[in-house]
Amino acid sequence: MPISGMLMASLIQTNMLSKGMRGEYVMKLTQAIGNGIVNTILSSAIYNGTSTGLTIGVGVSVGKLSSGVTVSSIVSNLILLQFISKGMNGQYIQKLASAIGSGVASHMMTAIVQGTSTVVGIGTGTGKINGVVGSSIGSLIFAQMISKGMMGEYASKLANAIGNGVASSIQQTIVSTTITGVAIGTVPPALPPIPGTGVEVGFVI
């Protein structure tokens, strides 16, 4: 199932409520965060990887994320560091970072990477997610916050801190794929498929 801003928001909200964060803007804030993060990933994340297996051919790559953005402690700590760097030291900052990190990681564990492999038609691949920029996530979160009437003096700092933290966690993320397709060997002359390496390109859905 494709990642969803509303589903991510729901997970973040559940974590916030479990930590005693029950203000009137909790739902609006989590929706702004979830939609900002997911919309940025869907529009800008690009998977680049190396494929290994049987050649020569073209295959379909399907993969999952691990480490980085799928680990709640990593996401939470990176967001918390951003909060602190922007002078946000309130009593709930650590709880907020933890709630956001847990919700983001839980949802991103369900993300799927789809793409294509060239040269390797059957095999496996590994690589990274590129193209996700913290300022872009922050800008979308901030825009969502404004649309929901959240315009306090720390709104922009909060949005950008979250954006930078999540983007940093994505940079640490590993993608592992399985490649299925056709490996035809060298032509001419026709020979059985041979082991080799290739490249993969894809997107997060």
Image: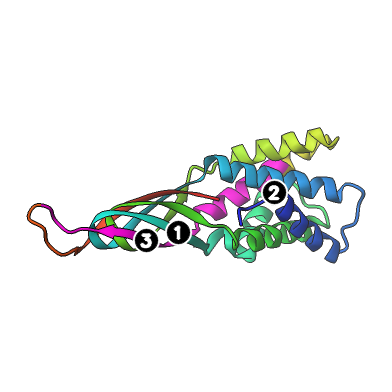
Residue 85 appears in the figure: no
Above/below status of 161 relative to 69: above
* Residue 177 seen anywhere in this rendered image of the structure: yes
Q: Residue 152 is drawn in which quadrant?
A: top right
The x, y position of residue 1, in whole percent, is 61, 57
Q: Amino acid at mark 1?
A: Val
Asked if 120 appears above or below 5 in the picture, the reply is below
Q: Which residues are magenta?
A: 159-187
Q: Name the residue carrying label 2.
A: 5
Q: CA distance from mark 1 to mark 2?
A: 22 Å
Label at residue 179: 3
Residue density around tag 2, few if under 14, some if 14–19, many if 20 or more, within 10 Å = many
Q: Amino acid at mark 3?
A: Ile
Residue 109 point in image, percent of width and height? 59, 63
Q: Residue at x 39, y 60 (%)?
A: 126
Which three-letter amino acid code belongs to the residue tagged 2? Gly
Question: What element does badge 3 sit on?
Answer: strand
Foreground disc of the pair 3, 2: 3
Residue that carries the numbered disc 1 in the rendered image: 62
